[in-house]
Structure formats: C-alpha cells, structure tokens
Amino acid sequence: MSDSPAAPAAFGTAVEIASAVKAGERSALGVLEEHLGRIGAHESSVHAFNAVIEDEARSRAMEIDDAIASGAEVGALAGVPVAIKDNMCTRGVPTTCSSRILDGWKPPYDATVVTRLREAGAIVVGKTNLDEFAMGSSTENSAFGPTHNPWDLTRVPGGSSGGSAAAVAAGFSPISLGSDTGGSIRQPASLCGVVGVKPTYGAVSRYGLIAFGSSLDQIGPFTTDVHDAAVIMDTIGGHDPLDSTSATDGHGSLESVLSDGVDGLRVGLITEMTGGAIDGIAPDVLARVRAAAEALAAAGATVGEVSVPSSVYGLSAYYMVAPAEASSNLARFDGVRYGLRVDGSNTAAMHTATRTEGFGDEVKRRIMLGTYALSAGYRDAYYGSAQKVRTLIIEDFDRAYADFDVLLSPASPTTAFEMGAKTADPLAMYLNDVCTIPSNLSGQPAMSVPFGTGDDGLPIGVQVLAPLMGEPVMFRVAAALEAAQRLEDGESR
Amino acid sequence: MSKLSRDDVAHVARLAMLDLSEAEIDTFTAQLGDVLETADAMAELDLASVEPTHHPLGLVNVVRPDDVRPSLDRDEVLSQAPEAEDGRFRVPPALGEE
C-alpha cells in the first residue's frame, strides 16, 4: 500500500493550518494550492468529489489573506480547506445528493453549517460524493460512480459519506462534513482511518441538509485528529432558529475539555457488540475494541461490560423508521420545483416519469419499503413497532449510563470490503450499520476514533458512545484513545 | 407477517409514483421481502405497554417568533425549477391523457 493515495493531514491539521495562516507563516492561497495539487494528482483514482470549486475557493482564500494583511479579525478556521458532502446546500453551487433527480439544481441558500464554517474562515473546496440521498454504506450507490478507499483503491470507503471520509484520508482537505442517519459518518470514518463524529440529535443545525430521515439525521465532521473534530464541533454546533429541531441547550466547548483525561471515568463495553448477540463482528475488529478498553484502563478509567439488549433489534427498527421518513421526505422530488423533469402528458404522468428516471435502485427500494411500512394495515405492525423499539433502546441506554459514563463498541463490523462485494444483497449491506444504528434511534452522540489496523493492514475505528449532550465526556475518551494509539505507533506528536 | 407479494410491490410502487418493469418487480419483491423478514424480529418483543418515540429530544410545538424576515428570492428559486411562468412553477395539465 506504499503507493496508495492515503495521506491524512498531508499539509497539516486544521488547527495547525489556521494557526500558521493567522501568524502570517503560510498564506491561505498557498495552503489551498497545496491541497488542489493533491486533488489534481489523485482525484481521478479516488473520486471523492462530485465537484471541486477551484475558482470560488481561490477568491475566498485571497479574501482571507487580504483580511489578515489588513489586520482584520479572522476566525478559528482561517484558510482551512473543507469538503462538504453533496447533500448540504451551497448557494449557487450544484448540490446533487449524487442523484440524477437534482440534475442542474443550484440551491438558493447555504446550509447553516456551511455559513458557520465560512464565517470561521474555512474555504469550501468542493462537494463530496455519497450514496444517493445518503442511502448506503459503500458510496457505490452514486449516480456519478463510486468513491474508492484511499488506503486500498480496490475497496470501498464506506458510506454514505464516503467522499467526505476519502477526501480527508487522501489529504484533499484536512477536514470535511458528512451526515449520519444510521452510521454514515462513523462507518466510513472507521474504514478510512479518520475521526468521524455523529453529534447528539439537535446539537448541529440540519437547516440546508437535504432530509433523509428527519428524526435521525445529524451533520458532523471528519478530521484527522480529535482536536480538529472538537474545533469543528465548536464551530458548527449550537442553536439555530432556522431548524426547529435544533436543541436550545448545548453541551459547551469541546476544545476546552480535551486535556481533562479519563481518570475515574467508567467505560462500558457493549456486550451485544463485542462477542455477544450481534453476529458478524470480525475478530481483528473485536481485538482492537478490547485493546481500546485496556488503553483507557491504563489511563485511569474503570472498564466493565454492560448489556444493551434491545440494540439487537436496532436494525429491524431502523429499516422501518428511516425508509418511512425517507418516503415522505423524498415525495418532494416530483419534477416541479428542482432539477430534473421528464415530460408526461399530465402532471401525474410527469411526476412518475421523473421519479422513475431520476432515482436509483436503492432509493426506490427505501421509498417503497417506507411507503409499505406506513400503508393501511401495516403501519402499526411495522412503523408503530419500530417507534416502540426506539423507546426500548433509549431505556436500555439510560440504564447503561446509570453505571457508565461512556460505552465502547466497534464502529464497523469489518475493515473496508472489496468494491462490489455487497451490491447485489441489500441486507448484507445494511448489516454494516449494526453497531451505529442504535445511536441514531436514541439520538445520542457517538464517534469513531481510529485505533490501529486489522489483519489486512486496513484501518479500524473504535466507537465511543455517550448520553444525550455527552459530547464533552465522549471527546475526553476519544482524546485518550488517540494518545494511546500514538504511543503504540511510536509517534512523538 | 404475511409474505410480501408481487402485487404488494406493484401497488406500493404506484403509491410512490414509480414505474417498475416486470423484472424490477421480481427483484424488489425478493429484496424487500428479506428486509421485512428482519423487521418481523420485532414481533418477538412485548410492545403492548411501550410508548412510541417519535423524536429523540421530545420537542413539542416549536414555533418561531412572529417576526417579518427576508425570505428566499423568488426569481432565484424559480430559476432552478424545470419550468416557471408568471412567477409560478409551471406543470403540465393536471387532468388529461395518461
């Protein structure tokens, strides 16, 4: 793999870049050109982006440099290139959800997260590839072709935010944003060896995120280290009046807790996901999760095991709730207001022709599944039961958090798999999210932290889970894991 | 649960405004059937006395202040539609030949 395009933080972390740009040691334009150079060299083999917006990025970088030269205040992310998953609105820049149905559509507004990153001085370099409408776990369901894992181009980067994860792993940008409905940040983060955070539901505004499962979706960062992730969370998080589900009480600064350590924290290994009732977790992944628990114990935490019995039903409930919400959310794509229209002799025929041609197979499957789960005679058995299972999962987590501050599990059951290996079997693909889905159903935060590699030499992420608005304790644990991994790697940084 | 039939899939596709070929109906019937079988696992649970969760934060009736604020520019929005006329979205006749 020595000739792989993987090079996380090729030109420094976001914190390092912003600090150098603000001090006048590096120019924002220079930093941008370094990253554009890497994109030029390796994007054709990785395909992380649906669009790279070089010209707009260059003018923005020059604005930052001018501001610094004139002594004006610049934000915490001054001059930091960022890649945005292509399901978040960027005004005047095509936003496709990797679907033909949004062909040619340019949003008339920016997502709140994009506005906040720009206000902090970050420079949007492009829009990243995803499974169409964020439905998938491999970024193979894109209308524009798959993204490849930078560590091994024959493997998937995970999904649905595979483009954003690959962009950071390949050093195309030091940070990126993804969205996570059932694991779409954490699983690709694990497979690409980067940090990926699914915040507490409501901690980050969803305004301008094209909706998939509205009670599950959250935006979060991909970064090369925990410090950057904390800074991005501090930048994009907090109440937004434009998102009525945005939480009014947040969790406070994360950057300020990173050095607090884990002494005295109680860490619980989720038994169902570490050799218990949930099958299919690879032995090399389990070994790294156990090594993570040992590392935290060595750092002063107490480690135990805890059962979250209803997590076993997470997948069953998720594949009713998420498709049901998707079938409703995607009803708006009917050839009237955005993008594609395929002509028909009347309005209904036009709607059907547009949707039939515009949506790919996985999106059609989920829409039909959701329509069925909500249809007369089945609603109580399917959607209704799934909503009740959500309650059981929340109750089980609450019981676990009475005895533990954070929980640990794998983020993904395996390392990155071969491209094409699961495309013919949707259910096999869905099983990728078995460890990540429960946190979306409960609304609680969880993140994947790179923690070594598997037997195949590919990255493995450990998932750290915390109670609602428990990001501070989650980040303390993530920082400790990162420190332990660096010791193991013999890094001095 | 009763097994998902081809007719069920064809019916659901019509509700969802999707036109499927006969071959697609076969494929989707098998694939969706597999997922529904997984969902049937929930039937093992006694859920009679469990309250449903609609939303993880339990927010109710969030309203914004009744203040006038700028909205999206109408022309910019309409410029992104497949067809517009006189400041409105234009569609084919609602009634007419199939």
Image (cartoon, rainbow, N blue to C red):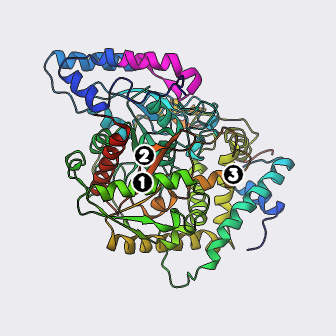
Q: Residue furthest right?
A: B22
| Percent x, y of residue A283 | 56, 54
Disc 3 and disc 2 on one polypeptide chain:
yes
Tell me where residue A161 appears, x and y as whole percent.
51, 41
Neighbor class of circle 3 (other Cα within 10 Å; few <14, some 14-19, many 20+) is: some
Query: Please, what is the three-letter code of the amino acid marked with disc 2?
Result: Phe
Residue placed farthest to the left in the image?
A71
Instruction: Determine whether, in the image, residue A254 is placed left or right of residue A394.
Output: left
Mark earlier in primary sequence (3, 1): 1
Instruction: Identify which amino acid the numbered label 3 is placed on.
Output: Pro
Q: Quadrant of the N terminus of chain A?
A: top right
Mark 2 nearby-residue class (10 Å; few <14, some 14–19, many ≥20)? many
Q: Which residue is mark 2?
A: A451
- Contact (CB < 8 A) between labels 1 and 2? yes
Dot 1 or dot 2, earlier in sequence: 1
Q: Nearer the viewer, mark 3 or mark 2?
A: 2
Are both tags, 1 and 2, on one chain?
A: yes
Q: Which residue is mark 3?
A: A426
Residue depicted at x 72% and y 45%: A352
Distance between the alpha carbons at the discs numbered 3 and 1: 32 Å
Q: Identity of the amino acid at label 1? A: Ala
Lower position in the chain sequence, tag 3 or tag 2: 3
Locate residue A344 relative to residue A12 in the image: left or right.
right
Foreground: disc 1 or disc 2: 1
Question: SS for tag 1?
Answer: helix
Residue A35 in magenta?
yes
